Image (cartoon, helix red, strand yellow):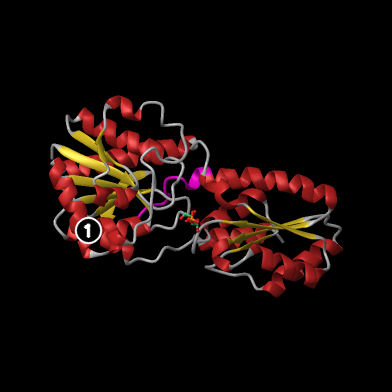
Amino acid sequence: MKKIAVLTSGGDAPGMNAAVRAVVRKAMYHDVEVYGVYNGYEGLMEGNIKKMELGSVGDIIQRGGTILYSARSEEFKTDDGQYKAIEQMKEFGIEGLIVIGGDGSFRGAAKLTEKGFPCIGVPGTIDNDIPGTDYTIGFDTALNTIVNAVDKIRDTATSHERTYVIEVMGRDAGDLALWAGLANGAESVIIPEQTESFESVVAKLKRGQERGKKHSIIILAEGVGSGVEYGKKIEEETKMDTRVTVLGHIQRGGSPSGYDRVLASRLGAKGVDLLLENIGGKMVGVENNMVVYSDILEILNTKHNVNMNMYKLANQLSI
Ligand code: F6P
């Protein structure tokens, strides 16, 4: 391949820029031209494609968000949309595409590969909900954003002797909530994969109160439901002064952590290596600190699991 393209798609994640940089620099290192596609698949269908230079990705490794912008596209889900995208790439002479995003984005990459256009997926989402990789780009940064926020909330929770329900992102996955729960020493972690019964959460809060505990932190994954509703129920049931914080999109922003920058660099570069070997239809990932790759279709047909041993541990440490 002599010309490849890169796009970011779906919810942005800190470290996406570092991945774009790695793709551009690794390709140029091998004398391959790289094109940046702006606005995800939407931009791909419209031909919003520009040639990248070494300098196009200078000074971005430390920046959150994505310099290529991101979008979610309905039209691209259709065959017509996909053929339109392939036509645009052919006009530029592009022979392979790297898609940085989550599972929705990989569905598109699989469709293009099926239609004869090789694509490689690079997992970029704060949710850490993609099989075939231990970590997705952005997860570590988002986790640290949550940890810092919860530390601050704990200060005021202690001062006012309150119970806090903190709703975190993760879509249908509980990874962010679980890891934050462990890292913040939360009293309870409520995740979609294993919802601790409401009664047991209440019983634990009451036990804590009887022991003289002054405040409690409950971390609730958004996939379980509304933190506001959950907080109301807790207050009604326990009569404890309860507040709710929905952390929201703050979790998606900010400068990527060192870990995310390194992960993004390794995965972006591996994506280029695969395309240059004429391999498409794969997703790169990291397992046991080794860069690996697997079939995108297999990834899409596999259910993501949280680490249940960690869930048990979180419960054991919060007795
Ligand atoms: O997938 C990333 C994510 O931030 C999820 O955690 C969340 O459910 C969703 O995107 C929010 O999407 P939007 O930014 O479109 O509201």
Residue nearer the viewer, 100 or 257: 100
**Residue 134 colored in magenta in the image:** yes
Relative to 77, residue 57 above or below: above
Relative to 35, residue 232 above or below: below
Residue 194 in which image quadrant: bottom right
**What residue is rendered at 59% in x and 63% in y?**
312
Magenta span main SS: loop
**What residue is rendered at 28% in x and 30% in y?**
25
Image position of 236 (left or right of 51): right
Count of numbered circles in the view: 1
Residue type at mark 1 is Gln
x then y, percent, for residue 205: 77, 65
x then y, percent, for residue 24: 28, 34
The secondary structure type at the circle numbered 1 is helix
**Residue 228 colored in magenta in the image:** no
Span shown in magenta: 131-141
Residue 83 in which image quadrant: bottom left
Residue 216 in which image quadrant: bottom right
> Residue 277, can we see it?
no
Give the residue pinned by disc 1.
82
Relative to 35, residue 312 above or below: below
**What residue is rendered at 19% in x and 44% in y?**
275
Q: Residues within 10 Å of mark 1 (few under 14, many from 20)?
A: many
